[in-house]
Amino acid sequence: MTYDDQNIFAKILRGQIPCEKLFEDEHVLAFMDIMPQVEGHCLVIPKKPSVGLLDADPTVFAPLFTAVQMLGNAVTKAFNADGVTITQFNGAAAGQSVFHLHVHVMPRKTGIAIKPHSGTMEAPEIIQKNAALIRAALG
C-alpha cells in the first residue's frame, strides 16, 4: 500500500485538523484519541510518513517507542491504572483504520473492559479534561 498524505494523521501533523496535543518533539506527536475505547486513550505517531510498522523507516522506532513508554507511564499515573494496553495494527484485516503508523496507549483498570471502536466521538470537554490529567503527569 502506498502512503496517502491526505490521511487524517498527516493532516493533523500539518495542522490542517486540530488535535488535543499531549507531547511533541521533532520525531513524534502524541495526542488524545477522539473515539476513546477507555478513559485516557491516546495515540503516538511518528512524523515521518509510513503506512504502518512494516514499511516504516527503522529510524523512527527508537523515538516512537520512547514516547510510547513515556505516555504509558503518564497515563498510568494520571488514571491510577493497574496496567496499560499498547496496540499497533498493520493493515485493514488487522484492524488498522488510519493508514499512518500509530500506537494506541490505553490505561487499564482491573475488571473494566475496552469498549468497542464505535466511531462515536467523545465530548470535547471530557477529552480536554483527560488530556490535562495526562499533561500534568508528563510534568
Image (tube, helix red, strand yellow):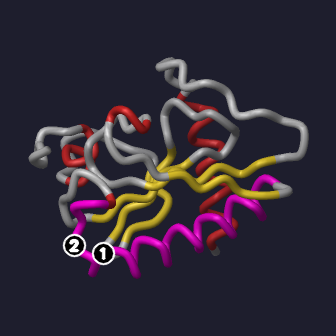
Q: Is residue 62 magenta?
A: yes
* Residue type, numbered disc 2: Asp
* Residue at left offset 78%, top offset 33%: 113
Task: List x then y, in percent, for residue 136.
Answer: 67, 65
Q: Residues within 10 Å of mark 2 (few under 14, many from 20)?
A: few
- Residue 19 in magenta stretch: no
What's the residue at 75%, 61% (across, down)? 76
In the image, 22 versus 105, the foreground residue is 105
Position of 44 compared to 130: left or right?
Answer: left
- Mark 2 vs 1: CB contact within 8 A: yes
Which secondary structure lies at badge 2? Answer: loop
* Residue drawn at the location 20% of the way across and 39% of the way down: 7
- Residue 77 vertical placement versus 69 (above, below): above
Give the magenta range: 54-79
Q: From the image, which quarter does the N terminus lie in?
A: top left
Q: What quarter of the picture does the C terminus occupy? A: bottom right
Q: Using the image as rendered, state which of residue 80 and residue 115 is in the foreground.
A: 115
Q: Position of residue 95 (x, y in %)?
A: 43, 35
| Residue 11 picture quarter | top left
- Residue position for label 1: 60
What secondary structure is the stretch in magenta mostly built from?
helix
- Outermost residue, front side: 93
Q: Nearer the viewer, mark 2 or mark 1?
A: 2
Instruction: Report the residue at 31% width, 64% height from top.
Output: 46
Q: Which residue is mark 2?
A: 57
Give the spatial CA distance, label 2 vs label 1.
Answer: 6 Å
Count up the numbered dots. 2
Amino acid type at circle 1 is Val
Q: Secondary structure at mark 1?
A: helix
